[in-house]
Image (spheres, helix red, strand yellow):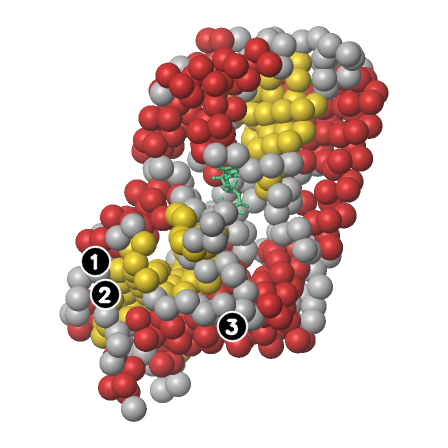
Amino acid sequence: DAEDLYLDAAFDFVVVSNRLPVDYVVDAEGTQGWRSSPGGLVTALEPVMREADGAWVGWAGVADREFEPFEHDGISLVPVPLSAAEVEEYYEGFSNDTLWPLYHDVIAPPSYHREWWDAYVRVNRRFAEAAIRAAKRDAVVWVHDYQLQLVPRMLREARPDLVIGFFDHIPFPAYGIYSQLPWRRQVLDGLLGADVIGFQRQADAGNFARAVRRVFGYATRGSVIDVPDESGELRRVVARRFPISIDTASFEELAARPEVRERARQIRESLGNPKTIMLGVDRLDYTKGIRHRLKAYGELLREGRLEVEDAILVQVASPSRERVETYRQLRDEIELMVGRLNGDYSTLGHQAIAYLHHGYPREEMVALYLAADVMLVTALRDGMNLVAKEYVASRIDDDGALVLSEFAGASDELRQAVLVNPHDIEGLKDAIVEAVHMPRKEQSRRMRALRRRVRDNDVANWSASYLETLTGSGTIRPGLSEQ
Ligand code: GDG
């Protein structure tokens, strides 16, 4: 009964993402609780959530556990349960071993398994149902990322009253690659249930529109796609770029704190105050181009264009998706390379690479950004790459140099970085050397322009501009779709 759908609905604004912005923690005494996992998305959406009576639907990160909806830090959270088998098939399998490699231009071979697809459909339905129960009549529902591409269509079918948004955080590949997906039709159809489909780059939106033309033959005009409903009537779907960003002010604030600056000085000192500290910060993922970076750095040492007495590479590789085989292999390869390079080039007094397979608190990350003269972002494919923006935002003294892959979405905006094609190892080496020797004046000219960019487009601008396109205004108002 349609009215039943609204029975426990309480919210005008519902965000749906694979993970809730909290972690479940049990301390030494066995006390259970929730800890915020601060990310850009929460920061951006928190104010909207509070103002608009919002809720967040997502998995709590613990398999085989059911949690009741609860409130944390003033945000209503609606947990969606996943079984251990679903985590394996929907999350590690279809999301991270099918879609992730496929959408990143098959840097690693995607695996296609029909059982994984079945689990993906089932879990997407569960997320959709949770959102349907949470959303008031005419509410705005904003679905995030590649794990939940079927949710927009499921929402529309059950609840045509809703305003439905989707944002894709990762690239959308060219049709020649996308067309490998055995379920290419269903996924496109799932996305087309949304009113607005947001992408990081114009290129992603273009790839999506082309796929829609090829698979369905629908007409597209610029960012508008005309999607016929069952009665043949055309519904207008917008697919365009909304480049995501960071909470710039909070990075600037951290970078100005005396204790963070002191920590940056300590880091430099503990590394022996070298002339140049180079830094890489990535989840340990094959899309990030860590191998290419290490290869280029090793050759520069071999050729004597860099010396371990003057330079060190600090590589933070935060643990990621460790139950997926490709990621285990990658870790072995990277650690073999690091071991070889250190064996070949380190001296008793000077290390070639400081390799850290850890996650760090935000303050420590900013201290590292402040300590680094050169930041290396060499992704082979990356939706945006927030690390590049965080480095820039933290450089409040307008110095330092950013080497940035043109295959990261961030390169559309951060034009004053030293842009590289990481596949071109000679070019990458030249870019690193250029960044290392960049005169202070030029660093400052470039960094000022880069910083202006991340200040002008911070994450609050991003969400406001998305929601404005979705709702016709920046705020969520009840009864919107009736207007
Ligand atoms: C996906 C897309 C897109 C990393 N290690 C630590 C740590 N981090 C933080 C970074 C940054 C975030 O994680 C990583 O964001 P990225 O954008 O660089 O990359 P993905 O994780 O692949 O994110 C990407 C993004 O979604 C947003 O749409 O830009 O393209 O792939 O914020 O700082 N943070 C802390 N300790 C760590 O050790 N505190």
Q: Are marks 2 and 3 in contact (CB under 8 Å)?
A: no
Q: Are marks 2 and 1 in contact (CB under 8 Å)?
A: yes
Q: Nearer the viewer, residue 34 or 210?
A: 34
Tag 1 secondary structure: helix
User: For mark 3, what is the residue?
Assistant: 123
Above or below: residue 369 compared with residue 104: above
Q: Which mark is residue 12?
A: 2
Which residue sits at x=66%, y=75%? 115
Residue 421 on image: x %, y %: 64, 34
Residue 12 on image: x %, y %: 23, 65
Observer able to see residue 328? yes
Above or below: residue 12 compared with residue 443: below
Tag 2 secondary structure: strand
Q: Nearer the viewer, residue 400 or 192?
A: 400
Looking at the figure, which quarter contains the N terminus?
Answer: bottom left
Q: Which mark is residue 52?
A: 1
Tag 3 secondary structure: helix
User: Which of marks 3 and 2 precedes in the sequence?
Assistant: 2
> Could you give the CA–CA distance between mark 2 and mark 1, rounded to whole angstroms?
6 Å
- Residue 438 falls left or right of residue 416: right
Looking at the figure, which quarter contains the C terminus?
Answer: bottom left
> Could you give the CA–CA distance between mark 3 and mark 1, rounded to whole angstroms?
27 Å
- Residue 228 falls left or right of residue 387: left
Above or below: residue 223 compared with residue 351: below
* Snapshot quadrant of residue 230: bottom left
Above or below: residue 393 compared with residue 107: above
Q: Report the amino acid beneath label 2.
A: Asp
Q: Which mark is residue 376?
A: none
User: Which of marks 1 and 3 precedes in the sequence?
Assistant: 1
